[in-house]
Every structure is written in C-alpha cells, then in structure tokens.
Image (tube, grey):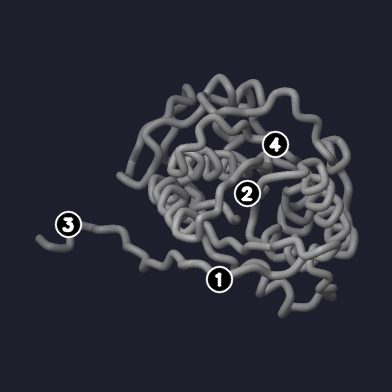
Amino acid sequence: MRHGERADNAFGDWTSHCFDKNGNYFQMDLNMPETVPKRSGGYNAYLKDSPLTKIGIFQAQLTTEAFKKAQINVSHVYCSPSLRCIQTCHAFLEGCGKNDLKIKIEPGLYVWWAFFGDSLPEWLTPEELTTWGYNIDLEYQPIISIDALVGKKETYAEYCSRSLVVSTEAMNAHSQGNVLFVAHGCTVAVCSWELTGKKTELTQETLDVAVEVPYCGFIEVSQCGDKWKKGRPFLRLSHTSNPVFDYSRLF
C-alpha cells in the first residue's frame, strides 16, 4: 500500500512558513498536522521526509474499510522508514483496531535512488518513533540496512532485485497470516510485478505506471503453490482536490 497525502505535495515549501527561527512548529492550514516530531537534524530534515496531512491520515483510516469488506485480516506489517509511511501504517492499524501489531521498519522498501537523489533522508530512528507513540518493533533486524542504501546508485534492475528480496524474505518469515507492506507508489508497483513474475524494463511507460499509484493505493498478491498471482480488486478511494480559499477576493 502506498502512503497517504504528504504535506510537501499539498503545500509545497511548507517548512519555510510553519517553523520559526527557534524551530517551533505552527499549523497554518486545517489540513496540516497539529504537531510534528522535533528532529535532531532540525526542521530541515522534513525537506526529504515529509509528514502526512490530516487528509492523509484520514485516507489511511478510510482504506481500512476495503480490507474489512474483503475480510482481510492483517497479521504482520512491514514499513518504509519514511515518516509518511510510518504515519500511514499507524493510522491504518488504528482504523483496523490492530494497535497491538508492531511495525517492522524495513529500509529495503524505500524508493529507487533515482527518485531521491544523491542522499537519503535523515529518518527518525525506531526509538524516536516509539517516543512519539508509534508501535515500532525495536527487535526487528532489517533485511536490507540503511547503510546498504547509502551512496548506492543502483540500476533499475538492481532496484527490482532489492524489491523482490525484501518482499520474498518478509513473506517467508511468516508461515501464517497476511503480510502488509506500507511504502511508496513505485514500491507497490515493483514489488507486485516482481512477486508475480512480471519483468519490466526501464521505460517511460513503466515509470509513469509506477508513479501514478494514488495515495493509499494498494494491491493484493496471493500465493498459489510456489507462485504468486494478482489478487482481487477492492473498493478504491477517490476524491477531488480542494484549492486554497483566498477570502479577500470576496471583498
């Protein structure tokens, strides 16, 4: 599943307007979070690691209805270390009444390096996230560490291989129960392609399909013997945008 609406996509350069010189955060729109975690790297750490908007939280909670209607019970959760993914995962589990499930933070679920540039985000640590109320599995050992991603300009083929390794090893770690991955749009696409054996080349069409996965878009992949196949379609989440209201234009 992809994360929900992110603050930087909704508000652009939001950090320059919402933090004072001392690093204190101020909410400037009802859709902005009321509070955000204080970070050791200061508020500039949010430039590459945006939180969700309130709509993003609601999207994650609303998506649980599709799982409930399909009678899918989530037993294990793996999540990208990006804050927007952690928050999506947390809100989804709350909506499912699964607050007891611990979130396994897996750096291997992060996007292809071509999408994030030469440096990784300065993510909050599992311990910091726990302090902020997120139920993180502090004993989990990642399949692919953060250090393994640092400075690695992997090819598209290597990114596909990483996605397959993470998804298959995570699946194989559990003999029973459904596994939920919460990550990024391209992760949803590539992990499902790799698991089902659909090999893709790096083309503009491939990139377009991968990045067009909508907020909280998800796909079910089911095991059939020693193979995986695309699962059932679910109720989708669709809505329109809401532009900024400039009340001064009324006067």
Instruction: Give the label, 4 or 3, closer to the camera.
Output: 4
Q: Which residue is mark 1?
A: 233
Three-letter amino acid code at the position of disc 2:
Val
Q: Earlier in the sequence, mark 4 or mark 1?
A: 4
Q: CA distance from mark 4 to mark 2?
A: 10 Å
Q: Please, is residue 107 above or below residue 209 in the view?
A: above
Rounded to the nearest angstrom, the CA distance separating label 3 from label 2 is 41 Å
Q: Are marks 4 and 2 in contact (CB under 8 Å)?
A: no
| Residue at point 64%, 55% (across, down) | 184
Question: Closer to the N terminus: mark 4 or mark 2?
Answer: 4
Tell me, yes or no, if residue 47 can be seen here. no
Which residue, given by chain and number where applicable, does mark 3 sit on? Answer: 248
User: Can you identify the residue that label 4 sits on?
Assistant: 105
Say which residue appears at 62% left-offset and 49% top-offset: 182
SS class, disc 1: loop
- Nearer the viewer's eye, disc 3 or disc 1? 1
Could you say which disc has been placed on residue 58 in the image?
none
